[in-house]
Image: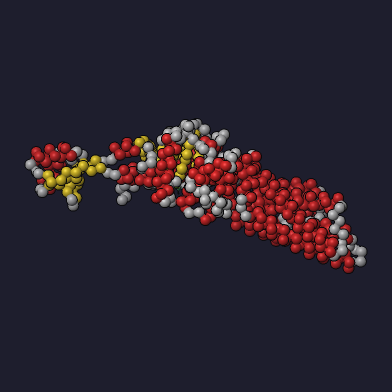
Amino acid sequence: MIRSLRSELRKISTTRSWWVLALILFGWVGLNAAGIAALGSVLVDQSGGMVGPESIPPLVYSTVTAVGYVFPLLFGALASTAEFRHQTLTPTFLATPRRGRVLGGKVGAGLIWGVVFGVVGVAASVGVGALVLQLTGVHPDLGSADNLALIARAAIAMALWAVVGVALGVLLPNQVAVIVVVLAFTQFLEPLLRLAANFWEWTAAIGRFLPGAATDALVGSSIYALIAGGAADALEWWQGGLVLGGYAVLFLAIGGLTTWRRDVT
Amino acid sequence: MTGAVIEIQSLTKRFGGTTAVDDLSFRVEPGVVTGFLGPNGAGKTTTLRSLLGLVRPTSGRATFDGRAYTELADPLGTVGTALEAASFHPGRSGRDHLRVAAAAAGIRDSRVDEVLAWVGLADAARRRVGGYSLGMRQRLGLAFALLGDPGALVLDEPINGLDPEGIRWIRVFLRDLAAEGRTVLVSSHLLSEVQQTVDRVVIISHGRLAYEGTLDGLESGAVARVRVDAADRDALARALAASGAVVEAAADGLRVSGVDAERIGSLAFAAGVPLKLLVPEREGLEDVFLEIVGEGEIR
Ligand SMILES: Nc1ncnc2c1ncn2[C@@H]1O[C@H](COP(=O)(O)OP(=O)(O)O)[C@@H](O)[C@H]1O
Ligand SMILES: [Mg+2]
């Protein structure tokens, strides 16, 4: 398993996709963090005390997951589907014929690279966000335990999303199909579902288990959670993490029993 | 070094309605180069992929010294493999491709540079595989096969796409590996491609075994014929046919089978027909091969 993990880590470090995605992640999260920080400081000034300055930094710092989780997700999915697309499953399974071990190595490598994405994303949301807050006169509040915990949990969420991506790529080995599914779901379908879920109490109870909602629960804040409001009680942060992990386990189990066992011809 | 004995036992593989391999059994011994032959679509690749645990056989077994590939403690150190249409990530360098495999098999990185130099890819090692020629990919595939210094080598059409210099090189290389006591199994759809390299051949057709044995044995299966001619061709044909020979008329004389040249000479002498040509002919190995695999009559 350790050998498999090392091999999988090398597979990622020897191709370009990780740093291309990490670079876009940094830019996109940085942009959003800066925008929300600037907007937030205006809001604090104009609201005449209605919006407290302490409510802005969590929103800014959580942009890493609010707008950035699609990147580790795509990264993980691309890492898995590349093996099918370039038929590198042949050398992979020749070197490690026990396919379960390969899967274990992939999950481990996904988690580790996911932490890298978490660090890059946090560097953008906190680095750029705190700077803009400072410049616009809102205290970045980086010393607060709540904010530090939020930042750490956001990094964990990013790592989990990379694993969900790895698992999804095993379940749906067609690279084009998985990109379409990821973009359609995260950018369009899920935000709609989360809004719609709030119409009734029972749908809201289910809506908490949508992956994006679970992420917000894990992180503890997000601009989406603010917009959507909360008819039902949000999950605890650790429950959010378990839900994300649950998606990964579910995809891995189905993929592992289907596409992963197929003949490699 | 003694390589593992490869054993294919009653192997059958169906893809939906197609039977790619049909109750196939044969053995491959160490110390010699064994050719695995058959026309395109005969089931060579499917057999080799079943042997390597990449394809799940419908029934039967394929083993190295009695163990399935998936049960080997050190797969790359036991069997080296270069499969047809070897698959590489185009964005990864040749060296990194091997480093990925080396990490998975617990092989030290310095071995990667060794095998790259061995197959003549030292200069291209850090370039992306996407820019490699077919011949370079074949060499990289061979480097992968050699990575674990394995006792057995399973190579699917390794000569395909090599330049003439590469073909000479690989022939010597395979013979050297077998001389060291390794098991070498090389597939090809052309007998002529491996004829000078192999000691034994396993020939399959439509997924079934058609011949297993030495090249000499294959040659002795060739039909012997004699080309013969006389000024009075008709008289000669009558005399030969009367003694039970099979006679075929051709533009440049008669083609006779069933009797040898010596017997034809005495038959002609007895019939009082002076000969002007008497040439024993042998079918080429390639013709025998095509006949065995059932494509001879199509031509
Ligand atoms: N994945 C597959 N699905 C369906 N049929 C296949 C598959 N792989 C091979 N075949 C069929 O099995 C037969 C044997 O193919 P193959 O083993 O590639 O032969 P060879 O390597 O001797 O050319 C062919 O008829 C081929 O079409
Ligand atoms: Mg083939």
* Image location of residue B221, percent across then percent down: 29, 38
* Quadrant in the rendering for residue A204: bottom right
Q: Nearer the viewer, residue A265 or A89?
A: A89
- Residue at 84% x, 64% y is A135
Looking at the image, the residue that sits furthest to the left is: B272
* Quadrant in the rendering for residue A32: bottom right
* Image location of residue B293, percent across then percent down: 35, 44
Q: Nearer the viewer, residue B67 or B145?
A: B145
The answer to whether residue A93 shows anywhere in this view is no
Answer above or below: position of A158 versus B199.
Answer: below
- Residue at 64% x, 43% y is A6
Answer above or below: position of A34 versus B128.
Answer: below
- Residue at 55% x, 43% y is B112
Q: Nearer the viewer, residue A80 or A260?
A: A80
The answer to whether residue B158 shows anywhere in this view is yes
Which color scheme is applied?
A: secondary structure
Q: Tell me if B260 is positioned left or right of A47 in this view.
A: left
Q: Tell me if A195 is positioned left or right of B158 in this view.
A: right
Looking at the image, the residue that sits furthest to the right is: A49
- Residue at 35% x, 36% y is B214
Number of marks drawn: 0
* Image location of residue A219, percent across then percent down: 79, 52
* Quadrant in the rendering for residue B225: top left
* Image location of residue A215, percent across then percent down: 76, 52
